[in-house]
Image (spheres, rainbow, N blue to C red):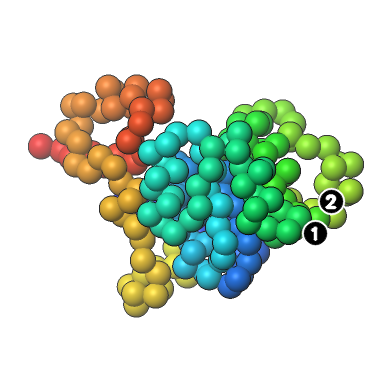
Amino acid sequence: MLLSDNFPTGWHAARRAAVRPGRAVAVVGLGSVGLSAVAAAKTMGADPVLAVDPVEDRRNRAERLGARAAHPRDAESVADLMTEGGFVSVIEAAGALSAQGLAFRLLRPGGTLSTIAVQTADRFAFTPVDVYDRNATIRAGRAPVRSVLERLLPLVVAGRVKMPTDVIVTHPAVPIEQGPDTYRRFAAREPGLVKVSFSFS
């Protein structure tokens, strides 16, 4: 299930953020795509990795993937302890302007920000002057999942990439009759609910 969309999207975000072995990476937003991006960054050898989300359960899940987790209000001070001048690669997977602004502030001069979340605002949280002054590279847009999957699937089959399904899929095989209620709980960001799969009787 993760391989059909969420994990390739997170993988694509990490690739577009220019993640490399030993590179400092931050991920802002820890839904199923953000957690997939954390897993992808760790697989690509990123170190250290900071994972940011206001929901404690999601931060705990990121820590299980090997990241250091922080609440958004603490992220910048934690970043100061983890890096010298910010993160070389930052992935924004939340979609809110506040998250986008935080992601940009975590970015070191000359770094790359990959924003993969669905955007609904008519502007970015930063200006062209901000981007110029920071000499930043901004990469935004949806993931071409089919083409990413063509490259990713052989790595998964060969065991070179492992999808942490047990960390990301929190509610497997929920009866489809419970779908409307489950979506309401998801929209309310219920703690412990990240990714759902449905079963049909």
Q: Looking at numbered disc 1 in the image, what kind of residue is underneath it?
A: Gly
* Disc ID at residue 47: none
Q: Earlier in the sequence, mark 2 or mark 1?
A: 1
Is the residue marked by circle 2 packed among few (<14), some (14-19), or many (20+) residues within 10 Å? some
- Residue at 67% x, 39% y: name it: 102
- Residue 125: % across, % down: 74, 34
Q: Is residue 6 left or right of residue 196?
A: right
User: Can see residue 199?
Assistant: yes
Quarter in which the C terminus is drawn: top left
Residue 179, by quadrant, is: top left
* Disc ID at residue 110: 1
Q: Looking at numbered disc 2 in the image, what kind of residue is underneath it?
A: Arg
- Residue at 83% x, 37% y: name it: 127
Judging depth in this view, the residue of 200 and 155 nearest the camera is 155
Residue 164 higher or lower than 131, as above or below: below
The residue wearing badge 2 is 134
- Residue 147: % across, % down: 50, 62
